Image (spheres, rainbow, N blue to C red):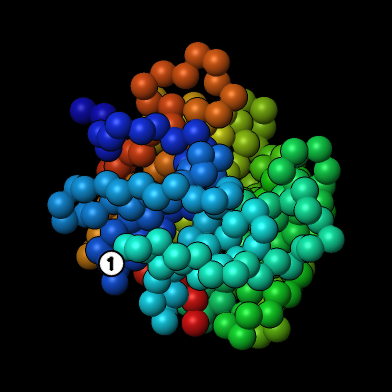
């Protein structure tokens, strides 16, 4: 038996991304950046709801004050659902109108780490930011083609982040002031595809999605490849652990750019990973 199942639904994502388990809502959220749309899967009932968004939406995070926070093309905004309301955006890059938010995640301390990129993917104009609880942006690292991640080690000492365009996953030591000097954690070969979204499990291993690689991989804290799980979609984009015990893994994919897309490209999958994940952070 395959260690995965496709979550049946009527709409396949153009570019599924931004997976988020929200214990407060008992739901998995994920984005379709290019539709653009926000999706929600209720884990108890299996019901899926989809909201059209006014512009590309790369990621969402739970907001401790209620609702969500989302990374749009034009900046970060608070989002409430039922009925849908999106607050005014806060843009860290008004001087770069061709950029958009791509991937992001809240940490255990209430901050959000998020990356920007050139929408046309022709310039290395992306930056990794830390969005503090007071709403200020701190530029952490620059020169990204396609930033993806981040993920946080359960020990709280490490931040993982990728530049998909360069086929490299970086690791940063987390400090009281931000991060220390980055190093290369894993470098992908051409046959691996490109590193995309990621998450850590409770044992401190990094789970990595392979865009154009048709699989997810688990890497040990020393960078050693532990195992891989193949999936029937080619462009695997993001990973999240969900459920009360954080033992249900969900994986997104994309069909953008595939002239011969199959029934699995752009699907949401549930994967039997055999391990539990870490509790998601919320924006403070």
Kindly identify which residue carries mark 1.
25
- Name the residue located 67 percent from the left edge and 58 percent from the top edge: 74
Toward the top, the furthest residue is: 260
Q: Is residue 279 left or right of residue 73?
A: left
Local crowd at mark 1 within 10 Å, few (<14), some, or many (≥20)? some
* Front residue (pair 54, 14): 54
Q: Is residue 134 visible?
A: yes
Image side of residue 136 versus residue 78, left or right: right
Q: Nearer the viewer, residue 169 or 26?
A: 26
Residue 35, image x and y in percent?
51, 39
- Percent across and percent down for residue 47 are 21, 48
Point out the residue furthest to the left here: 45
Q: How many marks?
A: 1
Residue 221's place in the image compared with 228, above or below, is below
Per the image, label 1 sits on a secondary structure element best described as loop
The residue at the point 30 percent across, 42 percent down is: 270
> Considering only vertical position in the picture, is 71 above or below 259?
below
Q: Position of residue 122 (x, y in %)?
A: 81, 38
Q: Quadrant of residue 81?
A: bottom left
Give percent across and percent down for residue 254: 49, 33
Which residue corresponds to the image point at 25% horizontal and 63% vertical from the top-left? 26
Residue at 16% across, 56% down: 44
User: Split into 4 quadrants, where in the image is the N terminus?
Assistant: top left
- Left or right of residue 200, residue 165 in this image: right
Residue 227 seen in the current view: no
């Amino acid at each position: 038996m395959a260690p995965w199942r496709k979550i049946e639904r009527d709409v396949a994502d153009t570019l599924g991304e931004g997976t988020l388990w929200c214990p407060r809502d008992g739901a998995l959220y994920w984005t379709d950046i290019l539709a653009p749309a926000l999706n929600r899967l209720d884990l108890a009932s299996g019901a899926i709801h989809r909201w059209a968004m006014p512009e590309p939406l790369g990621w969402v995070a739970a907001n401790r004050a209620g609702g969500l926070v989302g990374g749009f093309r034009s900046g970060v905004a608070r989002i409430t659902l039922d009925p849908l309301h999106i607050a005014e955006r806060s843009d860290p890059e008004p001087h770069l109108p061709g950029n958009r938010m791509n991937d992001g995640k809240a940490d255990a301390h209430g901050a959000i780490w998020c990356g920007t990129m050139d929408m046309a993917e022709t310039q290395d104009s992306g930056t990794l930011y830390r969005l503090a609880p007071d709403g200020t942006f701190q530029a952490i690292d620059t020169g990204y083609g396609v930033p993806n991640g981040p993920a946080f080690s359960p020990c709280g000492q490490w931040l993982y982040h990728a530049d998909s365009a360069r086929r490299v996953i970086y690791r940063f030591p987390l400090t009281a002031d931000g991060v220390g000097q980055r190093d290369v954690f894993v470098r992908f070969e051409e046959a691996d595809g490109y590193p995309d979204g990621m998450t850590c499990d409770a044992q401190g291993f990094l789970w990595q999605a392979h865009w154009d690689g048709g699989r997810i991989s688990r890497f040990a804290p020393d960078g050693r490849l532990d195992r891989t799980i193949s999936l029937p979609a080619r462009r695997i984009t993001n990973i999240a652990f969900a459920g009360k015990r954080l033992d249900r893994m969900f994986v997104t994919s994309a069909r953008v750019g595939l002239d011969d897309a199959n029934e699995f490209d752009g699907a949401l999958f549930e994967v039997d990973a055999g391990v539990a994940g870490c509790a998601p952070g919320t924006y403070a």
